[in-house]
Image (cartoon, helix red, strand yellow):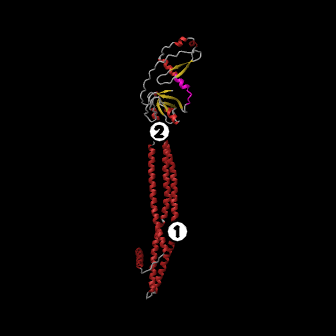
Amino acid sequence: MAEEQGKTGKGINTGKLATSMQKRLSRAQEKVLQKLGKADETRDTAFEEGVANFNKQMAEGTKLQKDLRAYLAAVKTMHDASKRLQDCLADMYEPEWFGKEEVDTIAEETDILWSDYHDKLVDNSMIAMDTYLAQFPDIKARIAKRDRKMTDYDSARHHFGSLQKGKKQDQAKIAKAEEELGRAQKVFEEINVDLQDELPQLWNSRVGFYVNTFQSMAGYQQRFHKDMGKLNQDLNDVMTKLDEQRLANEAAAVNHSVTPDAAPKTRPAPPGPAPVRPPPSPRPSLTPAPDTQQQDIILFDGEALVSDANTTAPSQATAPSQATTPSQPQTDTAVAAAAGAATTAVTNGSSEVLPAGVIYKVKAMHDYAATDGDELEMKAGDVVLVLAWENPDEQDDGWLMGVKESHWLENKDLLAKGVFPENFTQKL
């Protein structure tokens, strides 16, 4: 029994194979006759145009799918590179630096943003692309089947026509050929009608698909770059604050490196003080009176002549011998005291209005050549307007901040200021 079923199955398979080979042979003969022009071929210009559009659409979709996969791979690569870069920054960022927690948060949010962007592209663009292209293989197979059925239809049509035109007409063969022709025509028309409806619809659907694909990608990119821009701005702000912290630390280190006992900068020692000459004897009083009389004190070594009002005691008015008798030379202490009194009188008694921000004036007693960009170069005799320090902590012992009076008189501004050694000047 089993042997009989096996023989039956083999017979069926052999019959199908023979039928298939006969169809292939018949189709090949029909194609040859059509190419030689001995048999006409069923043509459908509209359908052929639809097939050409289908092939173009399938090629464009396949290329788009390939490029989209390459773009996703590049996004993944950029994500990995960004993560490694952010991790490197977070690892080398020392805890005492400004914004350590902010840097760690930015690195974490950047990684999440890249992952979300990649996942959205895969879920909404790549999957839609794969679904769009999945319909092409089936339609392509049906187009090929339609071509085969059209060849069968043409072959049946030509066979039926040749039997009708034969000298000896066999009605049985003609009837069988007509039956085969009807069957071939029915199969061909069913496939042909379905494809004629589907191909134009598929061709027109490409526009909507392209719009949805690139519109969604553009939206994802816009949101991604917007959020990434905020994170980059936050990182830039942290780096700016870190640089400010660095500059402040460097300035503090420079200030602490100068000890109070040490000289702020290396400078030549000023020459010794000029010799002090004794003042001349006081002039005799011509009109003694109980009121005040003027005594002139002459300051040597380039100082101005200043008069000091001294009150004359009544005993002086009644003792002419003291007024007419020259006094003995005064000691150095008396001369220095007189010079100090004269200087005070000039400074305190002057009615000159100093510019805003100026504390007092000094006069350069020696030349000073600036050795740094923030120093003020002076020549002996220059008058300098002394300014207050904006930050008292920055002032070094033995140094003043000021601007030359000549610059102020010429430009009416205090911008050309600089520091200079106090022991090279004398207060006016």
Q: Which residue is mark 1?
A: 201
Where's residue 112, x and y in %? 49, 50
Where's residue 5, x and y in %? 42, 74
Q: Is residue 124 left or right of residue 18?
A: right
Q: Is residue 404 visible?
A: no
What secondary structure is the stretch in magenta mostly built from? helix
Q: Secondary structure at mark 1?
A: helix
Q: Is residue 255 above or below residue 163?
A: above
Q: At 51% from the left edge and 62% from the top edge, which residue is drawn?
A: 210
Say the numbered circle drawn on residue 33: none
Q: Is residue 377 above or below residue 8?
A: above
Q: Which residues are magenta?
A: 342-353
In the foreground, 165 or 275: 275
Q: Is residue 78 visible?
A: yes
Where's residue 368, x and y in %? 44, 30
Crowd rating for badge 2 (residues with CA inside 10 Å; few <14, some 14–19, many 20+): few
Residue 372 in the magenta stretch? The answer is no
Q: Is residue 305 left or right of residue 19?
A: right
Q: Which residue is mark 2?
A: 247
Mark closer to the observer (1, 2): 2
Residue 344 in the magenta stretch? The answer is yes
Q: At 45% from the left edge and 81% from the top edge, which residue is drawn?
A: 158
Q: At 51% from the left edge and 65% from the top edge, which residue is drawn?
A: 206
Mark 1 residue type = Gln
